[in-house]
Amino acid sequence: MWSYLDGRREAIGRVFKRDDLRGLWPEELDAGLAELAGRCFMEQVGAGRVAVGHDARLGSPELAEAFCRGLESAGGTVRWLGLCSSEQVYFMTGRHGDELVAGAMVTASHNPAEYNGIKLVRSGALPFMGAELQELRRRMEAACELREGDDCREEFAQHLLSLVPLPPAVAGQRPLRVVVAAGNGVGAWAFRPLGERLAGCGVELHYLDETPDGHFPHGVPNPLLPAYNERLGAEVRRLGADLGIGFDGDADRAGFVDGDGQSVQASQILAMVALDRLERRGASGPRPVILRNLCCSRLLDELFGRRDDVELVETPVGHGQIKRLMRHPAFAGRVLAAGEHSGHYFYPEFYSVDSGMLTALTLLRHLLALSRRGRTLADELSEWRRRFLWSGERNYRLADAAQVRQALARMRGFAQGEPGRHLLAVRPCASLDGLPLVAEDDGGATLAPDVKVCVSSPDGGGWWLVLRPSGNEPVLRLNVEVWDGSRERLDALVAAAERVIRGEE
């Protein structure tokens, strides 16, 4: 399970030799291991000052700096010698034994260039070897053991069920069969105590890829990836399940598939959550707010945009943006629900942060009610799926940031002159102390380079597209939706947008 720590312990065993530490750099002896060695060495020799030097090998300065960080983290101080010979380290610890408790020289001596190491001495240039060296190894290996955690899962499960209580099972009612996919992340581990409580509510759980494994043998757990949802959908069909829940690696996002194994769009989940909460909320209190980012479906506009009893607000992409908005005095106490197209769902009663598991409970409660009426999730979604067609998020890698900016600039002219066209941008909102919202692009200041083009047809149909850059690499992300049920129009729009991105028109 903890392959990195296992590998670290193995590396420690390989680099400890008869008289010093020696190993391949950086495959065996890297900066992390050197820092650990410095910390454990300082703890072993006691408080004081240590002379540290290094030779001319390529990795020696980095390893020496890391060793010093380890010394200082354990309360030691460093007398930095820098580039020097081993005997100069010996000289300093011998000549200044009243000042220095030890010395360390980063070197692999006569070994080939791909090696490096650490030679250690005590005050007075006394060799640090034999039993002392083995004690250092023991300390370093012990430092690789995980500390025992304070398991909060039971308390967490109890709290979530207090927020979304599920009714007890009905005698004679077929259990709701659910597949929980973790993708070898922490999802199953975190969800299991909650799942054990659901048995009494008529929910039968099955787990897929539940063992945490950072190699992710079946691919990265990400509900936005088609392959992840296809694997979950196949397991749902195999078991004849009613629902599939797929968590991402750290289990704060959740994706869902219905009993046919078909993915459910995050916007559709947000719509169901908001409808459920609006119905349970009643008519009292201030006008509720629903926050959704600019890549969410037009479905939300049609369900909530024309209602007088709810306010629909469009935000930039980014869970941090939504969390800030939820806490702003203009919205605090009014947020009904919030979500993103990526599978983040936010709840004011859950500290205004995201919870895929709270979303799963809300959906399970809804499905239990549906099943008692003889309906399925696919039945509920059929009309929404017929009308609103989404491209999914598509990624395009460009050569550099300049090409990304040029493509975004070209996209601002997309569908220029077409009736019903609106160009939207991420703009600072004065009434929210400059926090960003999505609004008409009037050519003024923007807070993000994201481009959204919307076109509404007189017949009630239309489409939108969003092109936005990744925050950390030269990649553009494209989302397109049509709401007239035309797959041909969707495909044509995606193809046209790709030509704009590539600069072909």
Image (cartoon, rainbow, N blue to C red):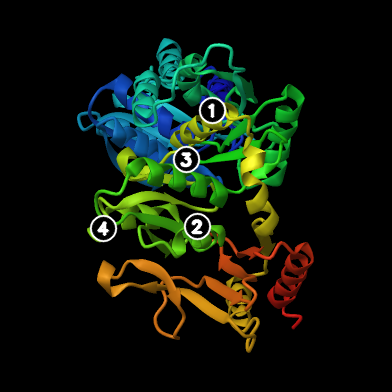
Eye-nearest disc, 2 or 4: 2
Residue named by callout 2: 303
Q: Residue at x 52, y 30 (%)?
A: 369
Which residue sits furthest right? 488
Vertical position of residue 110 compared to residue 7: above or below: below
Residue named by callout 4: 328
Q: Residue at x 75, y 32 (%)?
A: 234
Query: Where, by quadrant of the figure, is residue 184 drawn?
Result: top right
For marks 3 and 1, the one nearer the N-term is 3
Q: Secondary structure at mark 3?
A: helix
For marks 3 and 2, the one nearer the N-term is 3
Q: Secondary structure at mark 2?
A: helix
The answer to whether marks 3 and 1 mark residues whose Cβ atoms lie closer than 8 Å is: no
Mark 3, residues whose alpha carbon is within 10 Å: few (<14), some, or many (≥20)?
many
In the picture, measured across the screen, residue 101 lies left or right of residue 181, that is: left
What amino acid is found at the position of numbered circle 2 in the picture? Leu
The picture places residue 341, in percent across and down from the top left corner, at 54, 53
For marks 1 and 2, the one nearer the N-term is 2
Q: Quadrant of the C terminus?
A: bottom right
What amino acid is found at the position of numbered circle 4 in the picture? His
